[in-house]
Amino acid sequence: MDHDNLSCLRTSNGVAKYHNALLYVALTRLRGKHPCGNIMFADFYQPIIRILQNPSHFGFTADGVLKACCGTGGAYNWNASATCAMPGVVAACKNPSSSVSWDGIHYTDAVYRYIAEGSWLYGPYAHPPILAAIQH
């Protein structure tokens, strides 16, 4: 498999980037057709990439940034046939707020908080930022 410098799959990230680019263009056109509407674009991809590029800057553990907080071992502490809350899966990290991934699929509350407060409510990864859009 082809991984980038963050150990992410290039193909998956390429699809996400392409999707976001097309979505942004489509929403821009939609705004033109409905100028009185409040149409926002909220990018989920870029905030996650920023965290993965510099996890300690955002308060996350840099060692094993892709490792799940709750899992069963291995390089990513994840196994599709033994996921969180299944019988026998009791391992969870001591401090979930310093982890990026909760269970190998979902992010931790700390990541979702950063995306909401640090990226979407005030910008820069929501166009327009959510709070700016609802104040009008």
Image (cartoon, rainbow, N blue to C red):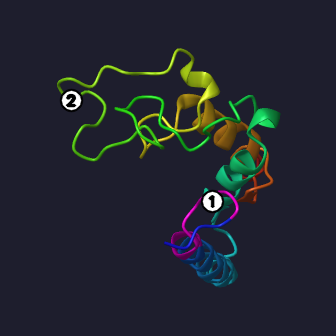
Q: Residues within 10 Å of mark 2 (few under 14, many from 20)?
A: few
How many dots with numbers?
2
Asked whether 98 or 119 is in front, the reply is: 98
Considering every residue shown, the one lying at the far top of the view is: 94
As for residue 48 lying within the magenta part, the answer is no
Q: Residues within 10 Å of mark 1 (few under 14, many from 20)?
A: some
Spatial CA distance of label 1 from label 2 is 29 Å
Q: Position of residue 30 (x, y in %)?
A: 61, 80
Where 135 sits versus 89, above or below?
A: below
Whether residue 97 appears in this view of the structure is yes
Q: Tell me the element at label 2.
A: loop
Q: Position of residue 132 (x, y in %)?
A: 78, 49
Quadrant of the rendered image containing residue 29: bottom right
Where 124 sits versus 101, above or below?
A: below
| Residue matched to label 2 | 86
Image disc number at residue 69: none
Asked whether 99 or 16 is in front, the reply is: 99
> At 63% across and 59% down in the image, what residue appears?
45
Image disc number at residue 45: 1
As for residue 8 lying within the magenta part, the answer is yes
Q: Position of residue 20 (x, y in %)?
A: 61, 73
Query: If you read the primary sequence from the N terminus, does the residue marked by circle 1 or circle 2 appear first?
Result: 1
Q: Amino acid at mark 1?
A: Tyr
Q: Amino acid at mark 2?
A: Met
CB atoms of marks 1 and 2 within 8 Å: no
Where 110 sits versus 13, above or below?
A: above
| In the displayed structure image, the side of residue 30 where residue 108 appears, left or right | left
| In the displayed structure image, the side of residue 135 where residue 18 appears, left or right | left
Considering every residue shown, the one lying at the far left of the view is: 87
Magenta segment, which residues?
5-13
